[in-house]
Amino acid sequence: MDFATTLKFAHVLAAALWVGGGFTVILAGILLASRSTAETQLAIVRATVLLAPRLFVPASVFTLASGVTLLFVAGWGWQPFTVLGLAGVIFTARFGALVLGPSCEKALKTADAWGAVSALPLLRRTQRLAMLDYAVQFAIVFLMVVKPSWSDFAVFGGIGAIIVLAALAALRPIPHATA
């Protein structure tokens, strides 16, 4: 097996750990939202905060670095899937570091100061933002598999529409609970 194939395997493995791990966290949060206590829901956030520097950040950095290396080693060059994939990975890594991570930390600080129930609205908002982030990540995976050309407008339009819909869903107002 040559270096490019080995690197491609490592790249896909890192991406699977990053995307799959985050998706599992989101799914656990969704499933527990109506079936558990606020403390249990915040346990998912605490686990995510522990996993971020140990799994998500290293996997995202390796995915980015190995992907850029593959541009040259595998001879892919600046094709649509590489350009848009690179842009997507940079977006989602920054979004995680600058938005999702601080939002999780804020939810935990709110829970520590005011109780777990008081952190739930912030937790819900963070979950919605994470879904937007994962719409971008799934679009990246789709691009890597399909490898469209610049003339595949329908593919790019479909990806764009999914991301816009995810953004609208993530940014819609959160209904206030009524007692």
Image: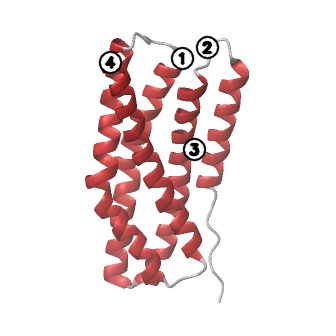
| 4 or 2: mark nearer the eye | 4
Place of residue 174 in the rendered image (x, y in percent of width and height, measured from the top left)? 61, 66
The answer to which of marks 3 and 1 sits earlier in the sequence is: 1
Residue bearing mark 1 = 80
Q: Which amino acid does the dot numbered 3 rest on?
A: Ala
Query: In the figure, residue 147 lies in which quadrant?
Result: top right
| 3 or 2: mark nearer the eye | 2
- Residue at (47% x, 20% y) in the render: 83
- Residue at (34% x, 72% y) in the render: 108
Q: Are marks 4 and 2 in contact (CB under 8 Å)?
A: no
Place of residue 73 in the rendered image (x, y in percent of width and height, measured from the top left)? 33, 14
Q: Quadrant of the C terminus?
A: bottom right
Q: How far apart are labels 3 and 1 at the CA level?
A: 18 Å
Tell me if mark 1 has few (under 14), some (14-19) or many (20+) residues whose alpha carbon lies within 10 angstroms of its own. some
Tell me if mark 3 has few (under 14), some (14-19) or many (20+) residues whose alpha carbon lies within 10 angstroms of its own. many
Element under label 4? Answer: loop
The answer to which of marks 1 and 2 sits earlier in the sequence is: 1
Residue bearing mark 3 = 135
Tell me if mark 2 has few (under 14), some (14-19) or many (20+) residues whose alpha carbon lies within 10 angstroms of its own. few
Query: In the figure, residue 172 lies in which quadrant?
Result: bottom right
Q: How far apart are labels 3 and 4 at the CA level?
A: 33 Å
The answer to which of marks 1 and 4 sits earlier in the sequence is: 4
Element under label 3? Answer: helix
The answer to which of marks 3 and 2 sits earlier in the sequence is: 3
Q: Are marks 1 and 4 in contact (CB under 8 Å)?
A: no
The numbered mark at residue 2 is 4
The numbered mark at residue 149 is 2
Q: How far apart are labels 3 and 2 at the CA level?
A: 21 Å
**124 sits to left or right of 103:** right
Place of residue 162 in the rendered image (x, y in percent of width and height, measured from the top left)? 67, 40
- Residue at (57% x, 67% y) in the render: 30
